[in-house]
Image (cartoon, helix red, strand yellow):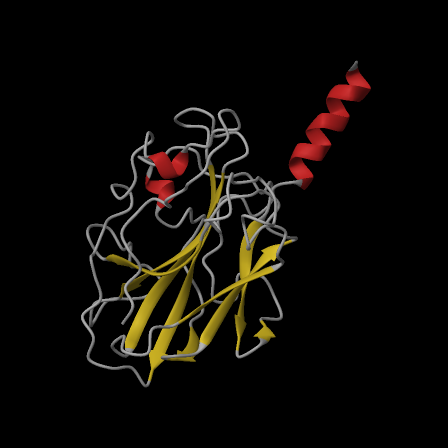
Amino acid sequence: MRFLTALLLATTAQAHYRFSKLVINGTPEAAEWTSIRQTKNYQANFGVTSVSSADIRCFQNKAGTGTATVAAGDTLGFVAMASVSHFGPVQFYMAKVPDGANINTWEASGNVWFKAGSISAVQGNGPLTSDEKTWPAYKKSVVEFQIPKNVPSGKYLIRVESIALHQAQSAGGAQIYLSCAQVEVTGGGNGKPGPLVAFPGAYQANDPGLIWSYYPVATSYKAPGPAVWEG
């Protein structure tokens, strides 16, 4: 029995993950936590389950230390260590750092976040599954989105979240794996990103996008949060 318990714990731990490196212009950062704020799961890889906790914002363990540079319109990726091991959507949010604020310590509280990308369920072909057929990000080692071409230039926090639905049969069961990168966007435009939301605040525990039904089998899915700003 002890052996079985240990085996189950080991299997669960291996299924967890963290986002700790950016992929910039196709090249991953050499070391973890270079331009991504180190998260509280940097050793244990556990997710956030309370959407009302401040951890749902950046889950950070300490302040940032570096800032990456990307151009508007570029594709930016996050490395999942070792892969996105649970099915569910992967979403990307951005928050512009105010002029004069220190990007390393800015908290990004309040209504400052807009959704810049989403890799959600593939729908329209009957019942949804819990594998790669429905969830394109599942089992990927890198997840990517395009920096909106018309986003204003400046410094941003970019938040990646993977909403794991494998235990989300009831409210509070979703596990959210997330981190925040520090990025300076160049060559931007004059767009007005929105709608703006807050973390915590954007999600509620009973949001349909945070709950998954194995039976009856789900036939549709809408990720939580606002619509993606197309820019």
> Foreground residue, 31 or 76?
76
Q: Quick check: 146 above or below 1?
A: below
Give the residue furthest to the bottom: 187
Q: Quick check: 89 above or below 102?
A: above
Residue at 57% from the left image edge and 77% from the top image edge: 26
Counting from the top left corner in percent of width and height, residue 83 is at 63, 52
> Foreground residue, 207 or 175?
207
Residue at 39% from the left image edge and 71% from the top image edge: 183
> Foreground residue, 206 or 130?
130
- Disc tally is 0
Q: Is residue 47 left or right of residue 203?
A: right
Counting from the top left corner in percent of width and height, residue 21 is at 55, 63
Q: Quadrant of the N terminus?
A: top right
Q: Is residue 97 left or right of residue 22?
A: left
Counting from the top left corner in percent of width and height, residue 164 is at 51, 40
Counting from the top left corner in percent of width and height, residue 71 is at 39, 81
Q: Quadrant of the C terminus?
A: bottom left
Q: Quick check: 147 above or below 167?
A: below
Residue at 58% from the left image edge and 71% from the top image edge: 29
Q: Quick check: 69 above or below 128?
A: below
Name which quarter of the figure residue 153 lies in: bottom left
Residue at 34% from the left image edge and 48% from the top image edge: 57
Q: Is residue 70 left or right of residue 98?
A: right
